[in-house]
């Protein structure tokens, strides 16, 4: 067995399929680990992935996986990019969908079967080729941890990463039989969760090592407030839990060479050009006013209620606000209603990678009132592009954004506006502090320039993952 060969499994990987930060991480972490390990990333070949654009070709390897009484055919595809090998699992039930996972109203209740197929396919890959490590991510590949544990001939060690504990993959217990899982695993210390099957529990229980995406989140998920009902279970497995901060790919998020921008830039002068261009693009006026932006999924997690409840109030300040995102309809409707009455708010609904880059480049402040945030990448990207994050200090936000207290800014530490207890008052007060700081041009610019120089890449965290792999391999 090649001692450094790693099978890295995920349900979404940029640039093939992305619904959020998971895809950024599954793109950038294997690249960062590629120096020390032979990385092979495996994901489903969803039907919307443009095979020819990425040079994805059949590997002429097909097999089938058996779950319960059904056989599911699998075809393997592959490509290589930047030294990372990619494997794609194609099976009609898993891949012939318009969306990755949902939305729930679209009737995709068979996600248990879909990602069951993915888990069995991962195990088959391990049977066919030896890998030293299987690195599984989130609930969609978690079941593979249990399946690997049941295969004594597979010597592969398993590392499981929790990217967001709120999405656990819970399904009706009747699925157990369809998944071909022995009912003996349907217990509190196995897959059972309040009468349902819980995929994430398989990852936590059966992996050799479990990681999550920031040190603070690792602590938070052991408590009731952030544990999503799994806090006791996670505490039970705490000896193998590690909190490792995510990084960003500093070539993909690079203001100095980003082709999505009006002009690439290395300083605040260049950033100002991008700000003017974006204001024009959004039909907003007033380049001297601070530009606040929000980019992200419109969900409860991201603090949408705080944002919407206070949007009218903050819009009354001399400022511009750009909101880019997609998600729950009630949030769309509420935002649209408010924006209609305020000429300084621009809304953009949908998912637009290159527009997002232009928004980061133009922003003076990024609003991140998240109620919980496992790591958060937006704040790292914002700082790299010279914007100051305004954050609720939870999870990775608490680990990466600091309030500037002293005149001197500490080397390597990112700064922004920070509040500690989520409330309308705390958010508005933080907003006021941002406006005040922006008025102090010298101080604001010093912090923005400092943030741009910080290293938010994978350099440090990839070393920690690599050391965990080495420990597992022994
Ligand atoms: P999440 O909880 O959604 O994973 P993260 O902060 O970890 O949040 O990562 C979000 C990633 O998705 C970032 O790269 C961000 O720029 C991107 N993103 C989120 N919403 C949009 C959107 N509507 N258009 C483009 N990019 C987006």
Image (tube, grey):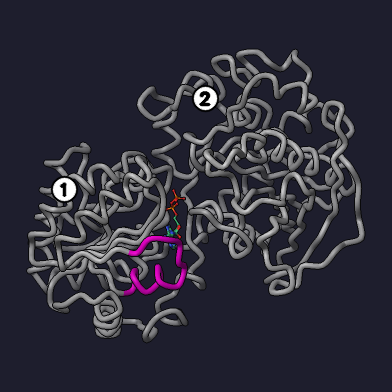
Nearer-N-terminus badge (1/2): 2
Residue 310, disc: 1
Residue 457 drawn above or below residue 10: below
Mark 1 → mark 2, Cα distance in angstroms = 35 Å
Q: Position of residue 338 (x, y in %)?
A: 19, 55
Q: Residue 381 lies in what quarter of the image?
A: bottom left
Of 256 and 142, the residue lying toward us: 142
437 lies left or right of 330:
left
Q: Residue at left 91%, top 52%?
A: 62
Quarter of the rendered image showing ligand 1: bottom left
1 or 2: mark nearer the eye: 1
Main secondary structure along the magenta-highlighted residues: helix
Q: Quarter of the image for the C terminus: give it.
A: top right
Q: Which residue is mark 2?
A: 234
Q: Residue 112 lies in what quarter of the image?
A: top right
Q: Residue at left 75%, top 44%?
A: 93
256 lies left or right of 181:
left
Magenta stretch, residue numbers: 348-361
Q: Residue at left 70%, top 24%?
A: 175
């Amino acid at each position: 067995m090649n001692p450094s060969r790693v099978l890295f499994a995920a349900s979404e990987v940029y640039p093939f399929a992305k619904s959020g930060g998971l895809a950024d991480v599954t793109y950038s972490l294997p690249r960062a680990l590629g120096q020390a390990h032979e990385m092979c990333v495996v994901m489903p070949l969803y039907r919307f992935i443009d095979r020819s654009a990425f040079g994805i070709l059949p590997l002429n390897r097909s097999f089938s996986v058996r779950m319960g009484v059904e056989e599911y055919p699998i075809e393997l595809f592959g490509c290589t990019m930047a030294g990372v090998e990619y494997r794609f699992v194609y099976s009609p039930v898993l891949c012939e969908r318009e969306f990755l996972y949902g939305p729930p109203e679209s009737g995709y209740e068979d996600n248990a079967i879909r990602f069951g197929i993915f888990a069995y396919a991962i195990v088959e890959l391990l049977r066919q080729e030896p890998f030293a490590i299987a690195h599984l991510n989130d609930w969609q590949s978690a079941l593979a941890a249990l399946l690997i544990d049941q295969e004594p001939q597979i010597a592969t060690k398993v590392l499981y990463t929790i990217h967001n504990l709120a999405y656990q993959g819970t399904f009706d217990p009747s699925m157990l039989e369809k998944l071909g899982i022995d009912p003996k695993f349907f217990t509190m210390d196995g897959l059972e969760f309040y009468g349902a099957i819980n995929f994430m529990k398989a990852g936590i229980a059966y992996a050799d090592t479990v990681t999550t995406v920031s040190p603070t989140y690792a602590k938070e998920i052991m408590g009731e407030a952030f544990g999503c009902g799994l806090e006791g279970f996670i505490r039970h497995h705490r000896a193998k839990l590690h909190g490792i901060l995510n990084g960003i790919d500093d070539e993909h998020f690079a203001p100095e060479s980003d082709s999505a921008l009006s002009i690439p830039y290395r300083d605040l002068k260049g950033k100002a050009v991008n700000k003017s261009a974006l204001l024009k693009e959004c039909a907003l006026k007033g380049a001297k006013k601070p530009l606040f932006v929000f980019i992200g999924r419109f969900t409860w997690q991201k603090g949408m209620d705080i944002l919407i409840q206070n949007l009218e109030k903050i819009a009354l300040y001399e400022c511009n606000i750009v909101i880019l995102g997609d998600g729950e309809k009630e949030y769309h409707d509420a935002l649209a209603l408010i924006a209609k009455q305020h000429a300084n708010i621009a809304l953009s609904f949908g998912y637009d990678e290159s527009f997002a880059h232009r928004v980061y480049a133009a922003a003076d402040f990024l609003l991140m009132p998240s109620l919980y945030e496992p790591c958060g990448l937006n704040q790292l990207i914002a700082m790299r592009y010279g914007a100051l994050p305004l954050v609720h200090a939870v999870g990775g936000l608490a680990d990466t954004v600091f309030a500037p207290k002293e005149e001197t800014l500490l080397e390597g530490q990112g700064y922004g506006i920070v509040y500690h207890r989520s409330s309308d008052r705390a958010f508005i007060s933080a907003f006021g502090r941002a406006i005040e700081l922006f008025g102090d041009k010298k101080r604001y610019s010093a912090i923005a320039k400092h943030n741009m120089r910080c290293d938010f890449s994978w350099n440090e965290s990839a070393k920690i993952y690599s050391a965990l792999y080495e420990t597992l391999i022994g």
